[in-house]
Image (cartoon, coloured by chain):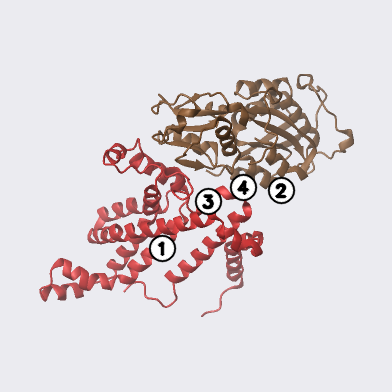
Amino acid sequence: MKRAILAVAASFALAGCSTTDAATTHRVTDATASTPAPEEAATVDVYAAASLTDVFTQIADEYMAEHPSIEIRLTFAGSADLAAQINEGAPADVFASANEKQMTVAGDHIDGESELFASNTLTIAVPAGNPGGVTDFASLANPNLAVVVCAPEVPCGAAAVKVEKALGVTLSPASELTNVTDVLGSVASGEADAGLVYVTDLARAKGVEGISFTGSEVANTSYPIAVMTTGDAADASRGFVDYVLGAHGQAALAAAGFARPGSVATDASAGK
Amino acid sequence: MARLPRWLILLAVIAAAFAVLPLAGLASRANWAELPDQLASPASRTALELSLRTAAAATGLCVVFGVPLGFALAALRGVTRAVLRAVLLAPLVLPPVVSGLGLLYAFGRKGLLGETLDAAGLPVAFTTAAVVLAQAFVAMPFMVVSVEASLAARDGRLEAIAATLGAGRSRILAAVTLPGIGVAVGMGAVLAFARSLGEFGATLTFAGSLEGVTRTAPLQIYLARESDPQAAVALGLVLVALAILIVAAAARPGRRVVQ
């Protein structure tokens, strides 16, 4: 249950792969034009939000196929866990957070600037067949329904509160969990009649249906990515970040249900 | 005591440091000046109170049902006893999340007994009762094994004498056997209470997490570590203190555990 433990496995960073002067860092703006010049072998430790698990695994595989000398090692956990691990000295080369707040938490270790690469929006998840007869957000206020959400203290819960306020609907949740995975678990098992999750989470859930609702856009979150000074492969890391921001990465993200960062109003306050 | 080889002492010191360092780590992150305020926060207090209440209820279940189960197990012999004991003590070593899934599929809305419980007006989904069930499930083996071991160490002579004096089965149990194993029952209860206080995985999986209803202290710590790590550490230190006190109470040196 503790994906964070993977971070331990990821901590065997290769020593002295590359030494880089930040001034010489070459920015590739279009990933499709990635350089054919021979690259120095490097291992890039990418710390990414749990919601990116499937799509980043795919993007990393594609990137490694194009760049045989580069190895991408992925560590997935909640963004807050990852930010805390980076602040505690985890050797992250790249950090991809599910919200801007946690990127700020790890802000001391950003090499250059972070850039937004995707955004996500809330949706209603119901068990297959929708036994509770959920139709829209307002129907979740039905006291006979067991509705589960993320706790207001964590980003997905803060987003739910924002939607409640915007739509003037007050929910009485049966459970306020710490992450979307636990919300999906409650819905998939049929224990809950409905849950609030991100659109992209539905793709990796079996036995769960999605019901989109108007007003979800008030709680859209943006995903920032940055090269981190805690790593030891700045050039290769920059290459991977550019690939995520480039055409290939963006296509994979769109296929996984993510929206482009500029296409929605971003959650600038990023607070709870 | 005989003198120990140096290498053994060295390994023992490493093991002791391994046990103590995480506690020191917790203590090093505590903001001692603000500790009382953090513990007085409504979220922390509610969670701690819920933990104490549910752990007490779960311990009660362990006494009422676990002691008879210990007796029944002790009365069996041979392979039956060995197999049954292995099955009944499994929750001790099961991953808590597996225990939680099992409880969900037994008592949850879609579980084996779910509809029966719903029809009886006793739905457990997302209720405090679910927390107590989860805690009792993982804590029961402590009581069973404690009672069974204590009974196995008795030779039955006192019970036989009581029988010759005309005492019935229940009278012998109440007047002779139970007082004889009182210490073991007490220890089983203390350990069951401690295990209930620390229950996390099965509770989260089976009962959910809602302030004042199902969010016990460990679940509050799990949540607070994202939003307020200092408060998580403060509450964690309370559980550490409770755990040390409980273990000390259960294992006072010189105490006779088995007759």
Q: For numbered disc 3, what is the local secondary structure?
A: helix
Q: Nearer the viewer, residue A247 or A182?
A: A182
Which residue is drawn at the image coordinates 15% and 75% (left, top)?
B162
Pointer 4 and pointer 3 on the same chain: yes
Label 1 vs label 3: CA separation?
Answer: 22 Å
**Sooner in the amino-acid sequence: mark 4 or mark 3:** 3
Residue B220: give its label: 3
Q: Nearer the viewer, residue B24 or B229?
A: B229
Circle 4 Cα neighbour tier, 10 Å, few/some/many (<14 / 14–19 / ≥20): some
Q: For numbered disc 4, what is the local secondary structure?
A: helix
Q: Nearer the viewer, residue A238 or A153?
A: A153
The three-letter code of the residue at mark 1 reads Leu
**Sooner in the amino-acid sequence: mark 1 or mark 3:** 1
Dot 1: chain letter: B
**Where is residue A189 drawn, in percent x and y?**
41, 34
Residue B227: give its label: 4
- Please give the residue where the numbered disc 2 appears in the rendered image: A87
